Image (cartoon, rainbow, N blue to C red):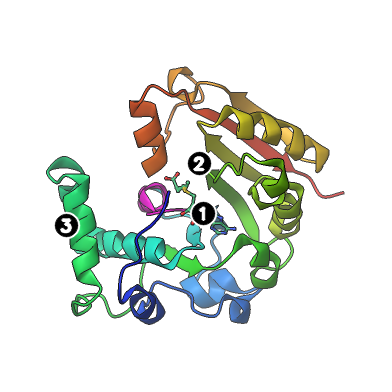
Amino acid sequence: MRIRHVKGSEEYVAASPFVIQRPEDHKGRFSKEVFGNDAPLRLEVGMGMGTFIRELAASDPGHNYIGFELNTTVLYKALRRYERQLLGEAGTERAEEAPSAVEERDERGASEERPSAITEATGNLRFIRSDARFLSDYFSEGEIDRIYLNFSDPWPKDKNANKRLTSQVFLEHYKHILKDGGMVEFKTDNRGLFDYSMETFPAAGFEIKTMTYDLHHDPELSKGNIMTEYEAKFSAKGNPICRLTAVYFKK
Ligand SMILES: C[S@@+](CC[C@H](N)C(=O)[O-])C[C@H]1O[C@@H](n2cnc3c(N)ncnc32)[C@H](O)[C@@H]1O
């Protein structure tokens, strides 16, 4: 999907107390230095507007969460939504506003003053704007407890296979930064990408723990499922949602 650039989004992201501006400075010490505790660290790679990780972090104060996103405008929109959630304005956007109104409000926001109530980051969620290709530069071996990949771009052409977030290139980074026995959870409605990933994970040494081609109709695996933006959109169209969980044990 093409994202319209929002003027001022770079400055907004650069000034946000919730964005870790130099992740490499915290390598190996993330939880202590960024969150001030020793809780296990979980990461969503390619989080989009952050609906999933915001809800997950709020429901699970026992873990630290990082939303990792490549696109600055997308991260900016995620930040706007997170700030509204913290200011107690959450819910309005889902229940009462058309998505276009939320978008419009996000875009106005870049030139507005930052809400004065949020000058300092608290809580168990932070964000990084970067490419997943640099994950091993930011996190040390075994620093991550779990990785979530939701509706990753499918890159259907063979020549782009290495850009898929479940390709060998990225799985090597996940293996490095995951703790022994750490897990990747991957959801998509794209059957081609899912079938491809069912092969790449075991080929890289992961054990597939669970899998389904229809998460929303699986009474066990759907328990506690948190929908992402893409998941809501595609399941509303009737697309079944595939999910796998894969564990990596270090030799
Ligand atoms: C199709 S969207 C899915 C968003 C969200 N996870 C969801 O399920 O609604 C994929 C997101 O991954 C981000 N992305 C793609 N490649 C990435 C990479 N190499 N590193 C970090 N983020 C990436 C894109 O910018 C985009 O926001």
Name the residue tied to disc 1. Answer: 46
Query: Which class describes the residues within 10 Å of circle 1: few (<14), some (14-19), or many (20+)?
Result: many
Q: Percent x, y for residue 50?
A: 39, 53
Q: Is mark 3 within 8 Å of ligand 1?
A: no
- Element type at mark 3: loop
- Of label 2 and label 3, which has the lower sequence position? 3
- Element type at mark 1: loop
Name the residue tied to disc 3. Answer: 89
Name the quadrant containing residue 174.
bottom right
Q: Is mark 1 within 8 Å of ligand 1?
A: yes
Q: Is residue 171 visible?
A: yes
Q: Marks 2 and 3: which is nearer the front? A: 2
Indicate whether residue 206 is drawn in magenta: no
- For badge 1, the amino acid type reads Gly
Label drawn at residue 98 = none
- Of label 1 and label 3, which has the lower sequence position? 1
- Element type at mark 2: loop
